[in-house]
Amino acid sequence: MTEPVKQPIVPAAFSPEDMARRRRRSIALALVLGGLVVFFFIVTLVKTGPAILNRPL
Amino acid sequence: MSAAFDTQTDSATLTSTGEARDFFALLKPRVMSLVVITAMAGMATAPGSVHPVIAFAALLAIAVGAGASGCLNMWYDADIDQLMSRTAKRPIPAGRVLPSEALAFGLTLSVGSVIVLGLVANLLSAAMLAFTIFFYAVVYSMWLKRWTPQNIVIGGAAGAFPPMIGEAVVTGDLGIHSIVLFAIIFLWTPPHFWALALVKAADYGRAGIPMMPNAAGPAATRRQIVLYTLAMAPVAVLPALMGFGGLAYLIVSIATGLVMIALSIRVWRTTEGEAATKACYRLFGFSILYLFGLFAVLLVENGLGLMWALPKVIG
């Protein structure tokens, strides 16, 4: 028995234009999250300083 | 919150089609830019130094924290924002962002910015940022704004805290420098806001906000604008007298302070018709330039090491 394919729940009120706006919003959110990853990485390097290389091998 | 803004029953309205720029607008970017420049000045004038990356990270956290408090303010005030011409096009009253989305956005950024500032800088600056957000979103927006004509006088403290947070980032402590910068912004807020409130009195009246022109009348407001400006202008010169503002700051603060006094007197004396409106807008517009100018000069002088030796009167 095969599982029925689940369709994403999209309210009928969303027009293609609305969906395009939501897509742009999702892309902006992804860029912000990606930027945060880079931001935290750099801040961690600066906060830790040269000691970041001091770890047991 | 009015009923129109807190009930969402239709499944199609559980999420909005607001775009990134609508969410950015919730952060009050113009206020944020003022917060950034004043916090930077607080950092630059603090006795000490901080790694540029840490300074940038801290500024980002302070800016986002300030934006978050603006977002929570817009969430709470959506019911009155729709009644006023100046605010009716904001994302929530215009229907582009749902109140629940704005609340979640504001709370997430508030918590996130405080945690990040605590991790990259220190606990004092994080605690101060948390207090600033609380003061603006809860004490000012939820309590003072709809209750007393002194709303923006007391609430103005929220906008005046960023230089103190900036100094706390650098030194882990609070000093006299940032307290003076706090005083400048604190005394600047009433003439700045009331100049606009005089013009928008009908709007505030419709929304039931007891701004000074509505509660005490235009004449009393005009008088208080002059008094606050007269108190502010000398305080704005203090950084030069205390040695953390240079010669350029001394000249700019005296010259622009005199312009502020002249414009406030014009508001006081011009009470009728188009000329009165123009006088108010002139003061409102110049006051923004004034504060930006003062802090920009302070920032350049301290940040770029362009201090000229001046006799220190205090400190």
Image (cartoon, coloured by chain):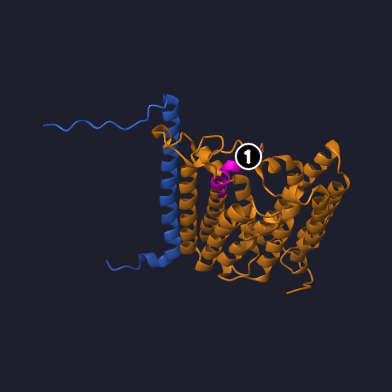
Chain colours: A blue, B orange
Inspect the image, locate mark 1, and give the three-letter code of the amino acid beneath it.
Thr
Q: Name the quadrant of the C terminus of chain A.
A: bottom left
Q: Which residues are magenta?
A: B73-84
**Residue B58 position within the rendered picture, expressed as x and y whole percent measured from the top left:** 53, 59
What SS does tag 1 mark?
loop
Asked if residue B83 lies in the magenta stretch, the reply is yes
Circle 1 is placed at which residue position?
B87
Q: Is residue B143 above or below residue B124?
A: above
Main SS category, magenta section: helix
In the rendered image, which quarter is residue A45 located in?
A: bottom left
Rendered residue at 86%/51% (across/down): B265
Could you tell me which chain the residue with mark 1 belongs to?
B
Magenta stretch encompasses residue B170? no
Say if B110 sits above or below B279 in the image: below
Q: Residue furthest top?
A: A16
Instruction: State the image coordinates of residue B171 (x, y, percent, origin top left).
Output: 57, 70
Could you say which is closer to the camera, residue B268 or residue B216?
A: B216
- Relative to A3, is B303 above or below? below
Q: Give the answer, above or below, for where B49 lies relative to B97.
A: below
Res. B207 in view: yes
Q: Quadrant of residue B168?
A: bottom right
x 42%, y 60%: residue: A44
Q: Farthest residue toward the right?
A: B269
Q: Is residue B287 visible?
A: no
* Foreground residue among A52 and B145: B145
Is residue A50 toward the left or the right of residue B124 in the image? left
Percent position (x, y) of residue B303? 65, 60
Pick the front one: B26 or B297 = B26
